[in-house]
């Protein structure tokens, strides 16, 4: 069994859009590949007014794989320390992300592919990919 998590922009399940900012999405859509069950879990992390980091919440749910657009170094570190595989570069719907992952179109994440947005103090002059505007 593999439990896949996609940070999503709402409660639309597999039809929901892949969220742009891993830690600040309203929901996580989780697919159990063995049973086909889909769960929609609210993001109750400290980024959304709750407790804990998003990566810790996913680890505590027994997630095996995270598919997302991108994420920062801290999330990469926490997920990898917990044995969760991460692939980035996904857009569209959660279903499209899962289909692309199943077809081997995943980009494994590493320190060099971390979102650079949080590495800068002057966010006004930095785009979402860590480049100067």
Image: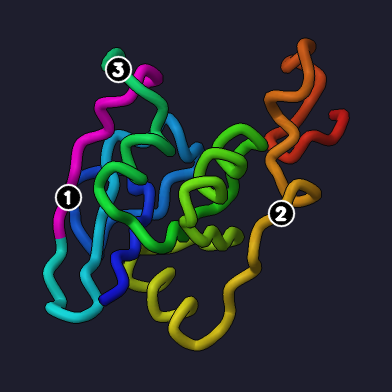
In the image, the segment drawn in magenta is: 39-47
Residue at the location (48% across, 56% down)? 83
Q: Position of residue 121 (x, y in %)?
A: 77, 11
CA gap between label 3 and label 1 equals 18 Å
For mark 2, what is the residue? Answer: 110
Q: Position of residue 93 (x, y in %)?
A: 36, 63
Query: Callout 1: helix, strand or loop?
Result: strand
Query: Callout 2: helix, strand or loop?
Result: loop
- In this rendering, is residue 78 above or below 107? above
**Disc number placed over residue 51 in the picture, else none:** 3
Queried whether the magenta region covers residue 44, the answer comes back as yes
Please indicate whether residue 83 sits to the left or right of residue 112 in the image.
left
CA gap between label 2 and label 1 equals 27 Å
Query: Which of the two residues, 75 or 133, is positioned nearer the viewer here?
Result: 75
Please indicate whether residue 79 sits to the left or right of residue 109 in the image.
left
Q: Position of residue 116 (x, y in %)?
A: 75, 34
Which quarter of the figure is the C terminus placed in?
Answer: top right
Queried whether the magenta region covers residue 58, the answer comes back as no
- In this rendering, is residue 111 above or below 4? above
């Amino acid at each position: 069994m593999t439990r896949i998590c996609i940070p999503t922009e709402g409660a639309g399940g597999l039809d929901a859009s892949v969220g742009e900012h891993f830690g600040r999405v309203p929901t996580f859509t989780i697919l159990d590949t063995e049973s086909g069950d889909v769960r929609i879990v609210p993001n109750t992390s400290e980024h959304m007014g709750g407790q804990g980091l998003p990566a810790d919440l996913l680890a505590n749910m027994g997630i095996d794989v995270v598919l997302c657009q991108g994420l920062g170094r801290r999330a990469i570190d926490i997920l990898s320390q917990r044995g969760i595989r991460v692939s980035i570069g996904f857009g569209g719907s959660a279903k499209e992300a899962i289909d692309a992952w199943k077809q081997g179109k995943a980009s494994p994440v590493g320190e060099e592919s971390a979102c650079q947005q949080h590495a800068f103090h002057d966010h006004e002059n930095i785009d979402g990919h860590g480049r100067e505007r």
